Amino acid sequence: MLRRERKLVLMITPLVLASCSSPNAPAPVVELSNPKSFKQFRQQGGHATYTVKKGDTLFSIAWYAGKDYQEVARINGIKAPYRIYPGQQIQLGSASKKNTKSSSKDTGQTSKTKANQPVDPPTKQAYGNSKLVKKTTSENASVVMPADVDTWIWPAKGKIVGRFSLAEEGNKGIDIANARGTPILASAAGKVVYTGSALRGFGQLVIIKHSDDYLSAYAHNDKILVKEQDWVKGGQQIALMGDSDAKQVMLHFEVRYQGKSVDPQRFLPKI
């Protein structure tokens, strides 16, 4: 009996190894619900894909993967306003011209039913003060995305308890601590492209698009006061400071330029 079992193991092992090393093996799938570090995303490179879930947006997926949302959109043949659908496979690395061309024809919809359920439609349920949301939306309906950011302001008052680091696993932004409920302000004018808590490690998160090159993020909020697709002015209150998915009450603030993390203090006024 033992000889048979050993013989069977010896026969199966090469098959398993062969299947793992096969060039036709499916690309690894990235799960935002099981967060990876930025280092792991880079190691996976052009082979990494992500399966879209309800609540995701192209901006949040690109943000978490440390990619430029425009590049991710180009690779997957997704046109503005960048709608994606549950079950859609998003490639996070480079793609061949053939794959890019075919993906532009196929939006990755898994069924006709899912095609009618966009993850990031133009309107979603508002967070916080609905009057503020409606006012913001109606007043800025015709706002055009600026080519660049003229002025940045500090997103919150408080003590800096964490600074930006270029280390592989370093802090990708700055951390500002203060009391719960401290106002969180938009650091510059722009469009809210993500609100929610789907990205573990960020808690209640707001992402604002300021131009084609610049995005900013505001994490660990206690309450969000804006919704996706809202246009906001620089200095406008967008959330309340909290400790969602954090060890203390604070704001984690990040700025991305073409998908890459940059030191926010390079842009903020000196204090």
Image (tube, rainbow, N blue to C red):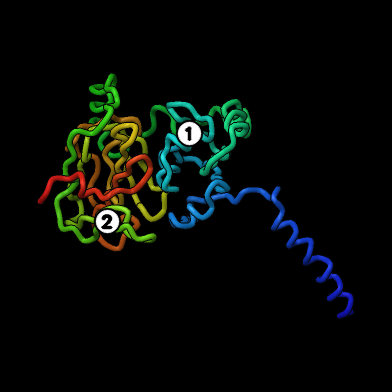
Which secondary structure lies at badge 1? helix
Above or below, 236 against 139 in this view is: below
Left or right relative to 56: residue 87: right
Residue at x-position 18% and y-position 39%: 152
**Is residue 179 rendered to the left or right of residue 206?**
left
Q: Position of residue 213 (x, y in %)?
A: 33, 35
Q: Answer few, some or many: residues within 10 Å of disc 1's Cα (few below 14, many 20 plus, some between 14 and 19).
A: many
Mark 2: few/some/many CA within 10 Å (<14, 14-19, 20+) = some
Give x and y (percent) for residue 164.
Answer: 27, 56
Q: From mark 2 to mark 1, how far is it between C-alphas? A: 28 Å
Q: Which amino acid lies under the numbered mark 2 shown in the image of this protein?
A: Phe
Farthest-out residue, bottom: 2
Given residues 64 and 202, the one toward you in this image is: 64
| Residue found at the very far left of the displayed protein | 271
Residue kind at label 1, given as amino acid type: Ala
User: On the rendered structure, is 80 left or right of 19?
Assistant: left
Q: Which of the 4 quarters of the picture holds residue 101?
A: top right
Disc marking residue 237? none
Residue receiving disc 1: 73
Q: Which residue is mark 2?
A: 164
- Tell me: residue 156, above or below residue 17: above
Residue 271 seen in the figure: yes
The mark nearer the N terminus, 2 or 1, is 1
Q: Secondary structure at mark 2?
A: loop
- Nearer to the camera, 244 or 164: 164
Which residue: 48% across, 26% down? 79
Does 104 sit above or below residue 170?
A: above
Q: Quadrant of residue 82?
A: top left
Please tell me which residue is depicted at 22% across the width and 39% down the height of the picture.
Answer: 186
Can residue 222 be seen? no
